[in-house]
Amino acid sequence: MRDPLQWPPPTRTCADRTGAARAGGEQAAAYRCMIVPHDRLARTREGFAPLPDASPAPTTNRLTDRPDGADAVFSVGWRLRLRFTRRSLDPANHTLRDVIEAEPGLGAARVLTVIDDGLVRAGGGPADAIEHYAGQHRDRIQLASAPLVVPGGESAKNDRAVFDHVAQAIHDAGLCRRSYVLAIGGGAVLDVAGFAAATAHRGVRLIRMPTTTLAQDDSGVGVKNGINAFGKKNFLGAFAPPWAVIVDPDFLLTLSDRDWASGWSECVKVALVKDASFFEAIESAAEALRRRDLDTAATIIRRSARLHLAHIAAGGDPFELTRARPLDFGHWAAHKLEQITGFRLRHGEAVSIGVALDATYSTLSGWLSEADRERILACLRALGLPTFDEALGRDALLEGLEEFREHLGGRLTVPMLRGLGIAFDVHAVDHALMREAVARLGDEAAGRGSP
Ligand SMILES: NC(=O)c1ccc[n+]([C@@H]2O[C@H](COP(=O)([O-])OP(=O)(O)OC[C@H]3O[C@@H](n4cnc5c(N)ncnc54)[C@H](O)[C@@H]3O)[C@@H](O)[C@H]2O)c1
Ligand SMILES: [Zn+2]
């Protein structure tokens, strides 16, 4: 078995990968998904023949002189330390201690802790535990100040004052580039704290401890940080890989049922674009996830986080320099839905609706079978996730396509499905057909038609 994080990955076609996935080969999950332009796909009904991935190859550093100057080509190496553990703040657990680098002659590393107030509201929060932990590991960890508690949820990304507050705390604590910001919270707090860490001194080390299902199975392992501005999601932000990510499912115990369910949509999403066998695993786990079985949750989270990280490490384009972003399946609509509902919908809920919508569009377009679409929608519902919202019917929804294009740059590129675990890109969306997809989801939500 090869290591899924090995670089470079073997080049395989979607057809190969899906075959392996159907055969139950879990390793198939980590293979690069070839993104196939829709126009090319349509011409190759038999013998599906994807084009080579356009992702840039790893570069060799070099300086090439030209008559009018020079071209410098260089790559930057990163190590992102992803760790899965339980009881992470018990001093007997050395996971956190061990990801903090010991620097000979410099003493303990300085650490500023930023905590999501949702944890505090849910009963205590980890501030005392962090202080106790640091006290037991004072040779390695020196808290630079008392833990900073910031508002959790999307308001943390909408209110610029939260970003300023974290940046100010980094300044006041005198952190340097070899210090650490330890962010403990949901995806929103991690995004804000990560953006402050990425921009202070042009980059202070960031350790994330995600505390929601969504942050543990998706956003926490990613390389993106940011806040919302000018009415647009993630308008201000930075690609900056975290130093380390520590995933501890014990944090999930205090989540509301709504936030517990919300995060499973990102697992379904990554399974649909990368790994059919993982989709089947989620289907089988849905009932246990619904009753909040923590061991099942830990297993699903671990597989999803690893798939997301494999895409970053081995997908060839961690900073999204090309247009292919299969992990954004369902996201053009999701981001717009969050915005036009004034963030009444959680990100994960909006993703669930966006996945249902693009799966339905894929079926109406003749790419995805009706049976596969029904399985996707049934799985989302079994996980306690929505597949429709009245806001889908608003005219503003389709503006999300143009905003998505602008955010990515270049021409419109939207992932669609031609099977479970098989994504491909389209560069145009038929608005009338998309409205038909919305109408179909609306009918089904109202109990008219199936599923
Ligand atoms: N950077 C990325 O790559 C990336 C990827 C996906 C999503 N995101 C972003 O993540 C955000 C959504 O994150 P989310 O789903 O984690 O929700 P969230 O961060 O909005 O948190 C939801 C609620 O749960 C509370 N909370 C957090 N942990 C808790 C716990 N253990 N117990 C009790 N309450 C707790 C929060 O205070 C908040 O009220 C969105 O802004 C989305 O855009 C970022
Ligand atoms: Zn997402």
Image (cartoon, rainbow, N blue to C red):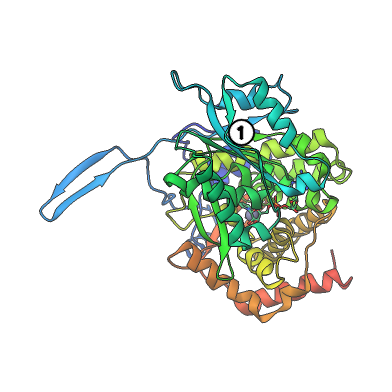
Residue drawn at x 50%, y 21% as measured from the top left: 107
224 shown above or below 142: below
Q: Quadrant of residue 59?
A: top left
- From this viewpoint, is residue 109 visible? yes
302 shown above or below 191: above
Dividing the image into 4 quarters, which one contains the C terminus?
Answer: bottom right
Residue drawn at x 78%, y 67% as measured from the top left: 388
The answer to whether mark 1 is within 8 Å of ligand 1 is no
Dividing the image into 4 quarters, which one contains the N terminus?
Answer: top right
User: How many marks overall?
Assistant: 1
In-front residue for pair 434/264 = 264
The single residue placed furthest to the front in the displayed view is 172
Percent position (x, y) of residue 202?
42, 46
The single residue placed furthest to the left in the displayed view is 67
Q: Residues within 10 Å of mark 1 (few under 14, many from 20)?
A: some
93 shown above or below 315: above
Residue type indicated by callout 1:
Gln
Secondary structure at numbered mark 1: helix
- From this viewpoint, is residue 224 visible? no
Percent position (x, y) of residue 95?
64, 25
In-front residue for pair 381/394 = 394
Percent position (x, y) of residue 336?
64, 69
Residue drawn at x 62%, y 58% as measured from the top left: 157
In-front residue for pair 250/92 = 92
Question: In the shown orientation, is residue 88 left or right of residue 422?
Answer: right
Question: In the shown orientation, is residue 340 left or right of residue 261?
Answer: left
Percent position (x, y) of residue 330?
64, 60
The residue beneath circle 1 is: 27
